[in-house]
Every structure is written in structure tokens, then in C-alpha cells.
Image: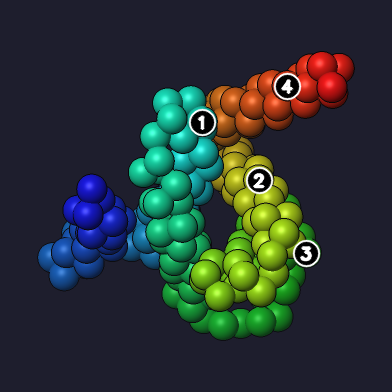
Amino acid sequence: MRWLKPALFLACLLPLAWWSWLGWQQQLGANPIEYITHGTGDWTLRLLLLTLLMTPLKRGFGWSWPLRLRRMLGLFAFFYATLHLVTYLWLDQFFDWGEIGRDILERPFITVGMLAYVLLLPLALTSTNAMMKRLGRNWRKLHRLVYGVAILGVLHFWWLVKADVREPMLYVVLLGILFAARLYWVRLAARGSASSARGA
């Protein structure tokens, strides 16, 4: 399975390569900034959900390979989230910090989007093996923030589109399934622990 990580790495770069090609050909549409902003946001959410999918695949099917891809998926989610943020700060607002501050305070979808990025940042910074060893058990607790990031990301998308919520609803359903799977395994583990305690 040595080809898995290189293949995933290249696959995760495909959206960026596609946008670069469209930009080179001047085919990003009438509003290129909006196109890139939405594209980077979409891929952030998709990669976040794929990151959360890896553990259910491991537990549900007994496969070991999904966990080997989880870190890379998470880092690419952070990469596209950073592109999403930079597009907003630079190309949309031209680093007008006063206007950016007003946006954060007055527009709820930007508020939750910024909060999601703030929570995602420490996850990316502590994704190395060295940080895992340094933090020990706290590393696992810290990385549970990814659940909050995913919820805020979906909410950010929902509040952005306002009217036609069919696409955000799809993310809500997928996220709900992923959370339900985790809740099922938590309860299953609790029952197993209770049965072991009674047997002892």
C-alpha cells in the first residue's frame, strides 16, 4: 500500500491545479474571487469530513490503512482553509483590518468561520509525531476539537448561502452520520466495559 499516500497527496492537489489552470486560461468566471473563495471553502469541508470518516472505516471494516491517511487529509483541510481565509483577507478585503473586524462582529457566517479556523490552527500545529509524544494523552483531547471545527464549518456554509440550503444540508446529513457512528461505538464500548465489570 505504499502508493496510497503519494496518490492521496496528488489527489488533494488536484483542485488547486484545476483552479490554477482555469486562472491561466482566464476561465474563472465573471467573479474569480468568489469562485476561488467558494471552491476553497468547499474543499475544506470535504476534506474535514473525509478526515472524520477514517476512524469509522477502521472500526467498521477492520481496515488499518484509513488511519494512515487521516493526518494528511487533516493537513490538506487546513491548507485549503488557509487558502480560503487568505482569499478573503487579501483578494476580497485587501487587508482592510477595520472592515474585516466589522465583518467578524456583524456577519455571523464570518464569525463562525473565523472561530473554526482558530480552532483548526492548533490541530495543524500539533500534527507532528514529536508533538504527539510531547502532549501525550492531552494530544487526543486537543484533537477532539475537530468535531467543533466541522460543526462550525457546516454552519458557516449554511449561513452563507441563506436561501438554497440543499448543499449545506447534505453536509449536515453526512456529519450527522459520522457523529452517530461515533456515538454508537462509544455506547458499545461502555456496554462492554459494564459487562466486564459485572463478570469480574
Q: Nearer the viewer, residue 4 or 171?
A: 4
Q: Specify the label residue 192 is tagged with.
A: 4
Circle 1/circle 3 CB separation < 8 Å? no
State the SS at label 1. helix
Q: Residue at x 43, y 30 (%)?
A: 62
Q: Which residue is mark 3?
A: 105
Q: Which residue is mark 1?
A: 59
Image location (x, y in percent) of residue 59: 51, 31
Inter-mark Cα distance, 2 to 4: 25 Å
Circle 3/circle 4 CB separation < 8 Å? no
Extreme residue in the front direction: 200
Q: Residue at x 23, y 59 (%)?
A: 6
Q: Earlier in the sequence, mark 2 or mark 3?
A: 3
Near mark 2 (Cα within 10 A), the count class, few <14, some 14-19 or many ≥20, is: some
Foreground: disc 1 or disc 2: 1
Amino acid bearing label 2: Tyr
State the SS at label 2. helix
Q: Earlier in the sequence, mark 1 or mark 3?
A: 1
Q: Earlier in the sequence, mark 2 or mark 4?
A: 2
Q: Specify the label residue 124 is tagged with.
A: none
Inter-mark Cα distance, 1 to 2: 18 Å
Q: Earlier in the sequence, mark 1 or mark 2?
A: 1
Amino acid bearing label 4: Gly
